[in-house]
Image: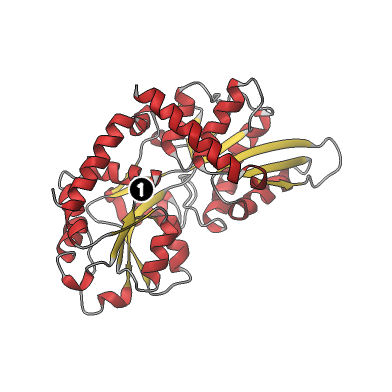
C-alpha cells in the first residue's frame, strides 16, 4: 500500500514542480567549435552557476560538445527520469543529485546503466553496481554564532549540546531542519538515530529549548550568522563552509561523537540519448582534474583519494579521523523512502519535541 502512496505523492509533487520550474530550468552552453556538434544533457540539483567551472573545463577538452544543463529539484530529477523512460522517450545523459535515496531507487528499479570504463580508484562505500557513484564528501555539522558563546564553551558533541540547551540564555535560539519538509534533514536525523541511541533525548531538549524548524540550510545559516540563532544543528557542511568564508562570526563544529557524511550521487540513465557522453562526463567528474576543480572552485569536498587539501575526503579524514561516518551508497538507502517507516519516525520526532 505504501508503494502506491509513495508513487502518487511523487506524481503530484512532480506536476507542481514542473508547473513552476519546467521551462526556466534549462541552460545551454554552446559548443566551442563548429564541427560535428553533439549535445550532452544533464539533470542536476546543483545550481548551474555553481557547476559552471566544471562544465567549462569539460568543454575545453571536448569543444564540439554543447551542454544542456537542467537545474532541477532532486524530486523532479527522479520523476522526470521515470516519466520519460516509461514513455519511451530519451532522458538526460547524466543525473547528479543530492537525494541519495532517490538516486539509489532509480538504479535499484532499473533506470540506470553500468559504467564499466571508470578507471578511478573509488572507495567501495561510494559506489554501487558500477552504475551509481558518489562525487562529494559533505559532512553534517553544527554551526554556531561565535559572539553568542563569549565566555561559554562551545559544545563539541551531542551530549554537550544537550546540556547547553538547558541554559535559558539559548531558549528559542537553536534551529534545525524540519524533517517533514526537508528530505536531507530527514536523512541526516535518521542516520543520527542509527548511531546514537540517546538521540531522542537531544530532540526532546531541542523542543524544550524552543527549537525553530526550517526547510533549507540557507535559512538556518542566515539566522545563525546574524545572531538571531545561536546554534544550527545538522547543517550541510559544504554550505556552512561557504558561509563562513564571508561571515567570520559563524563557526563550524564537526561533532566529536560522530559526524555523518553524505555524497552527491551521479548515474547514467538507462534511456540516455547519448550515454557515451554521459559516461565521459561522469569519468571527468571522477578524475583527479575534475575533483580538484570541484574542491577548489565549486567548494564541494572532493572524494577522490588522490586529491589532497583541506576540502577533500583525505583532508577531512586527517583532521577528524574515525568520527566521520559516510553514508554507504547501496540498496539500504531505499529504506528511507518507506512511507510507513518514515511516518513512524516523524511521529517519534514530533512526540520527542513535545516531550511526550
Mark 1 burial class by Cα count in 10 Å: few <14, some 14-19, many 20+: many
Please provide percent x and percent y for residue 100: 43, 38
Please provide percent x and percent y for residue 300: 49, 53
Q: Dot 1 corresponds to which residue? A: 185
Residue sitting nearer the eye, 280 or 83: 83
| Depicted 37 relative to depicted 30: above or below | above
On screen, residue 344 versus residue 113, left or right, reads left
| Depicted 118 relative to depicted 50: above or below | above
On screen, residue 344 versus residue 184, left or right, reads left
User: Which quadrant, please, contains the N terminus?
Assistant: top left
Please provide percent x and percent y for residue 66: 75, 41
Please provide percent x and percent y for residue 230: 30, 69
Q: Examine the rendering and report whether any part of residue 234 can be seen.
A: yes
User: Which residue is drawn at the image coordinates 23% and 62% (left, top)?
Assistant: 210
User: Which residue is drawn at the image coordinates 59% and 47% (left, top)?
Assistant: 290
| Depicted 130 relative to depicted 168: above or below | above
User: Which residue is drawn at the image coordinates 60% and 23% (left, top)?
Assistant: 85
Amino acid at each position: 500500500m505504501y508503494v502506491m502512496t509513495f508513487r502518487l505523492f511523487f506524481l503530484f509533487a512532480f506536476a507542481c514542480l514542473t508547473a513552476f520550474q519546467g521551462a526556466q530550468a534549462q541552460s545551454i552552453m554552446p559548443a566551442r567549435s563548429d564541427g560535428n556538434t553533439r549535445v550532452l544533457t544533464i539533470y542536476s540539483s546543483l545550481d548551474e552557476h555553481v557547476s559552471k567551472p566544471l562544465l567549462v573545463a569539460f568543454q575545453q577538452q571536448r569543444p564540439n560538445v554543447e551542454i544542456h544543463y537542467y537545474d532541477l529539484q532532486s524530486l523532479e530529477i527522479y520523476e522526470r527520469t521515470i516519466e520519460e523512460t516509461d514513455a519511451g522517450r530519451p532522458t538526460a545523459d547524466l543525473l547528479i543529485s543530492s537525494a541519495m535515496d532517490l538516486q539509489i531507487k532509480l538504479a535499484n528499479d532499473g533506470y540506470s546503466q553500468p559504467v564499466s570504463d571508470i578507471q578511478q580508484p573509488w572507495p567501495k562505500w561510494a559506489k554501487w553496481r558500477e552504475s551509481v557513484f558518489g562525487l562529494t564528501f559533505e559532512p553534517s555539522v553544527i554551526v554556531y554564532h561565535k559572539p553568542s558563546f563569549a565566555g561559554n564553551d562551545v559544545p563539541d558533541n551531542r551530549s554537550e549540546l544537550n546540556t547547553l540547551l538547558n541554559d535559558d540564555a539559548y531558549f528559542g535560539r537553536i534551529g534545525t531542519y524540519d524533517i517533514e519538509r526537508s528530505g536531507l534533514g530527514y536523512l541526516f536525523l535518521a542516520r543520527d538515530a542509527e548511531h546514537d541511541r540517546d538521540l531522542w533525548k537531544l530532540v526532546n531538549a531541542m523542543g524544550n529549548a524552543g527549537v525553530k524548524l526550517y526547510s533549507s540550510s540557507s535559512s538556518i545559516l542566515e539566522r545563525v550568522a546574524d545572531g538571531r540563532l545561536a546554534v544550527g544543528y545538522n547543517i550541510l557542511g559544504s554550505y556552512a563552509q561557504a558561509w563562513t568564508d564571508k561571515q567570520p562570526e559563524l563557526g563550524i563544529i564537526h561533532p566529536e561523537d560522530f559526524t555523518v557524511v553524505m555524497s552527491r550521487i551521479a548515474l547514467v540513465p538507462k534511456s540516455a540519448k547519448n550515454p557515451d557522453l554521459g559516461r565521459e562526463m561522469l569519468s571527468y567528474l571522477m578524475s583527479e582534474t575534475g575533483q580538484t576543480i570541484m574542491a577548489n572552485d565549486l567548494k564541494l569536498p572532493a572524494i577522490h583519494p588522490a586529491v589532497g587539501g583541506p576540502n577533500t575526503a583525505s583532508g577531512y579524514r586527517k583532521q577528524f579521523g574515525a568520527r566521520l561516518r559516510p553514508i554507504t551508497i547501496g540498496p539500504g538507502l531505499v529504506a528511507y523512502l518507506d512511507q510507513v517507516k518514515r511516518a513512524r519516525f516523524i511521529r517519534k520526532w514530533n512526540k520527542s519535541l513535545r516531550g511526550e
